[in-house]
Amino acid sequence: MATYHVENFGCRATQADGAAIERQLLERGLRRADVAAAAEVVVLNTCTVTASADHDARAAIRRIHRQNPQAQILVTGCYAQRAPEELSAIPGVSVVVGNSHKHEIANYVVPGASRLIPLAELTGSVQTAREPNHCHHEPAAAEGGSAVRPPEANVIVGDIFAHTELTAAPVFEGGVLEKTRPNLKVQDGCNNRCSFCIIPYVRGKSRSLKLDHVVREVDTLVASGYREIVLSGINLGRWGKELTPRTNFATMLRAILERTAIEKLRISSVEPMDWTNELIELVASSPRICKHAHVPLQSGSDRILRRMHRKYRPWHYADRIERIRRAMADAAIGADVMVGFPGETGDDFEQTRALIDGLPFTYLHVFTYSSRPGTPSATMPDQVPVQVARNRNRILRELAGQKKRAFMESFVGREVEAITLTDFDGEYTEALTDNYLKSRLRGRHHANLQARVRIEDVQHDALLGCIVRLT
């Protein structure tokens, strides 16, 4: 029986895609290997949101090829869709499969053997495709010399914008991959055109999983023993907008609550304009929805938001965050923030810092701007010097750390809801609170328990406590 290993890079939607790939490979008769060094087939499911993400993928390919030179390496995901020729030039890569054909990856592997199907043997809808890409890219230089594309490396990439529906592979039964909190991707693609973002060009148009399909997936996960599910997507709040009849994200949440027995739903990132009063009220009122709102900000400067082509202004954003906090006093509230966007002045940055300082955030994901080939911002004038951007990044991270620490300390002596993430490791059981705080619990406990937890202390980046009762 051939062995496989999947490595995922990037967002929750990519992790959900990786789980679907694993299901395909298992159904083809392959056996999972815990590490790439022990696998005959290695799938790298890549991200391309920043230059750093691209670098991480290339480094992983070279590491795996060095440690396991006989492995067949398939590269898929967003980087594969954006720059397939670049990836195919790296020694060790056998096949590059774009997001356009990711759902057919298992077709390139022979069950029970350790070789990939050559393109000449592929039939049906899977074809080599080098259609015009929306992004300019150049082949990367190989280590120690100019780029040389191995003749055996196959490139299978098609027009991602031709995809108009979202389908999903069956979710795992019996908890094969995730012990506690699986990602269920219910939406893919994005119709926004933020000037810095490459994702619409590698994920395509916004597409939603039909409501009945969502409910079936949730039911299957519940039957498999899962107690908390994370709903994910590229632009999750846009779920249902292109379906017929047109519907919305809050309607989907209500259907899941009414038609399934899932104990906890957690919502991943939702854009500020999609945090409607209806959605805020629903999340606040339901004990089965985690009190957690991740609301991308990017910048607190109106001028920079306009240059970014973002669809809200700082005062609109502040209103949404304040409404969320009034509705849910103990909710985790987080944001993505970008520093160093082209043209960002010291005054623009100070507006961002001041807005963040005045809002009740409990954590931030701070990113330094990374130019993406083919995006409008890549050719904008007034690129911010790297050291300036890094210093701004440090300032916001320090501010975020202060806010997170104060939020964590506010729970000492209180009880909160949590789910255990791991089995007892000899010292603690790791857990995650309903409001997204990492916890370590005293006592011997198994993973996947919903519990009422008493918080006793804060140490470093985690709450310390004990289980009061199981729920």
Image (tube, rainbow, N blue to C red):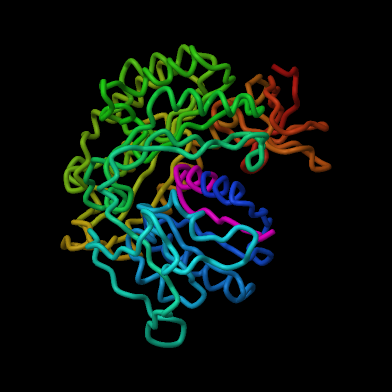
* Frontmost residue, 87 versus 56: 87
Q: Magenta span has 13?
A: yes
In the rendering, at what x and y percent does residue 123 appear? 41, 59
The image quarter containing residue 386 is bottom left
User: Is residue 117 depicted above or below 330 in this figure?
Assistant: below
Give left or right: position of 166 versus 341.
right
Q: Residue at x 66, y 27 (%)?
A: 225
Q: Is residue 303 visible?
A: yes
Residue 72 place in picture, x, y as percent:
56, 68
Residue 391 in view in this figure: no
Q: Is residue 385 left or right of residue 254?
A: left
Picture coordinates of residue 231, whole percent (x, y): 47, 31
The residue that appears at 43% across and 73% down in the rendered structure is 153
Which quarter of the figure is the C terminus placed in? top right
Check residue 435 for magenta coloring: no
Q: What's the residue at 53%, 36% (across, down)? A: 170
Name the quarter where the N terminus is drawn: bottom right
Q: Which residues are magenta?
A: 1-19
Using the image as rendered, state which of residue 132 and residue 392 is in the foreground.
Answer: 132
Residue at the bottom extreme of this rendering: 145
- Depth check: give the residue in front, 247 or 446: 247
- In this picture, residue 453 sits left or right of residue 119: right
Residue 209's spot in the image, x, y percent?
38, 31
Q: Quadrant of residue 379?
A: bottom left
Residue at 48% x, 12% y: name it: 258
